[in-house]
Image: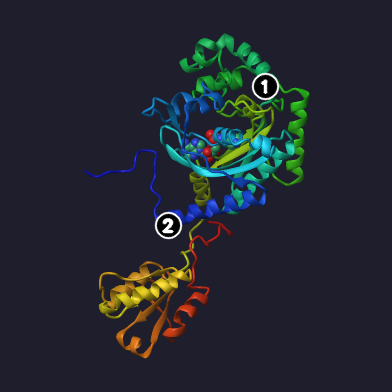
Amino acid sequence: MAFQALRGTTDLLPEEVARWSAVEHAARRLARVYGYREVRTPVIEEAGLFLRSVGETTDIVQKEMFRFKDRGEHDIVLRPEGTAAVVRAYLEHHLHKTEGFAKLFYLGPMFRAERPQAGRFRQFHQYGVEAIGSASPWVDVEAITLCVHILRECGVKEAVVWLSSMGCRNDQENTAADLRGRLTPHKSKLCQECQDRFEKNVFRVLDCKNPTCHELAWEKSYTQEERGNVSWPFLLCDECVRHDQEVQRALRQLDIPFERSKPFTRGLDYYTRTIFEVRAAGLGAQDAVAAGGRYDHLVEEFGGPSMGAFGFAAGIERVLMAVAHGKSGEAPAARRGLYLAAAQPTLVGETFRLIQRLRERGVMTLMDYDGKSLKAQLREADQAGCQAVAILGERELKDRTISVRELGPRSCSQTLGKSERTVPLDVFVEEIAQSSGIRHHCGEKSAQGGI
Ligand code: HAM
């Protein structure tokens, strides 16, 4: 019986992990530069947290949560997103009292029982930020700028920021009543799900995937002239229009290009005012690499004070797909680290002791444990991508020396570089530790210059 990873989940092998780490590194570094601090919340949460925030009538809650009862009959879910959990933690640890305005970021796995397809997984990974405690449009602008900055740093080139506003709660009530009125004559033509959700949450018709529902909601219900309105289909009050305009003005001043020629909605209920999505080329139907917006009522709905908030999250899988799309060919990975080969199997203990000293100095070092021939060890060093091989032999040990050979470029497999030198054993560890090429601290690789 062969086991396989579950549908919609993926194993990341070492090469892949290196690409992921570069994205995570860029997200962490820039989030800190913009003044966000990292939080880590549990992967499991009470189901009610998402019912109350993401919304009972949303696809995420109705169809996509991995939900189960634990032994104590608690209603548990694997978190489908990070915002609700971060707001819960913010309130549970009284950050609203001790800090007020808090800028928090997170990275981690999220779970949605969706039908897997390209770019859509059941376990996927997000980095995200939440700025809790301010209603200022500058907070929207700062987070959108950070989102774009991280994507650029990761090497995502062909991406567009789509911006819109869903208005305040009052505007949303007016918009819902207006939309219901427009859709009533067509109600029987809507899919069963939309008919069921029509009274409770008519906005779900706007993001229904069924083509008939989509056409009825977006096209048939509005005249050409009405569709020319910037905020269509949302009816915005003066204050929401002002907020929206300030966000747009600031983004233009900062040279952050954005699109708003076509309206859109978000499939989570907590949003108010600004919403945005970054859509990248080459990703097919699942083209949103990052998305977010303002959620000015969530803190209060969770029992906290009335305060505005804004955030976004990006899917790491999709960011990497977008980076791969924009790349013509990958440069071979640079050689790193040292292979310490033993000319005689009897030297394994001596080799191990030397290796330990090198590792304590932060040098990535490999060796053979199985008494392989010197030729086989050299082959292994080459395949592992080591930058140099040091060979320890009985004779050298007697002379208190060791020979060090640089390996050739990665693409010329098996070739050894010309440089071979004999190094006194006493200075060997120090010399290798000082050699910037061989020395490689784990996690040192940065995302600078693409992934
Ligand atoms: P979301 O639009 O549901 O928003 O997800 C954000 C991003 O996560 C998407 O743009 C996409 O890149 C990625 N993503 C979502 N579902 C999947 C999936 N099944 N497979 C792969 N990637 C996926 C949120 O999660 C909000 N919490 C964002 C937010 C933060 N709003 C305010 N603060």
User: Are there few (<14), some (14-19), or many (20+) residues within 10 Å of tag 1?
Assistant: some
Location of the N terminus by quadrant is: top left
User: Are there few (<14), some (14-19), or many (20+) residues within 10 Å of tag 2?
Assistant: few
How many marks the image carries: the answer is 2
Task: State the SS at label 1.
Answer: helix
Residue for point 30% across, 75% down: 348
Give the CA separation, mark 2 to mark 1.
Answer: 47 Å
Whether the residue carrying mark 2 lies under 8 Å from ligand 1 is answered with: no
Identify whether 47 is placed above or below 330. Answer: above
Identify whether 151 is placed above or below 222. Answer: below
Q: Is residue 286 visible?
A: no
Q: Which is nearer the eye, 443 or 100?
A: 100
Query: Residue beneath label 2, please?
Result: 15
Residue for point 68% across, 16% down: 174
Judged left or right of residue 301, residue 363 is: left
Question: Where residue 8 sits in the image (x, y, percent)?
Answer: 39, 38
Question: Which amino acid type corresponds to the residue marked 1 in the rendered image?
Answer: Arg
Question: Where residue 446 sits in the image (x, y, percent)?
Answer: 55, 60
Q: Is residue 428 visible?
A: yes
Q: Which is nearer the eye, 210 or 238?
A: 238
Judged left or right of residue 90, residue 441 is: left
Question: Which amino acid type corresponds to the residue marked 2 in the rendered image?
Answer: Glu
Quadrant hosting residue 308? top right
Identify whether 299 is placed above or below 120. Answer: above
Question: Where residue 354 sits in the image (x, y, percent)?
Answer: 39, 76
Label number found at residue 169:
1
Whether the residue carrying mark 1 lies under 8 Å from ligand 1 is answered with: no
Task: State the SS at label 2.
Answer: helix
- Label 2 or label 1, whichever lies nearer to me, is 1
Q: Which of marks 2 and 1 is nearer the N terminus?
A: 2
Residue for point 47% across, 56% down: 18
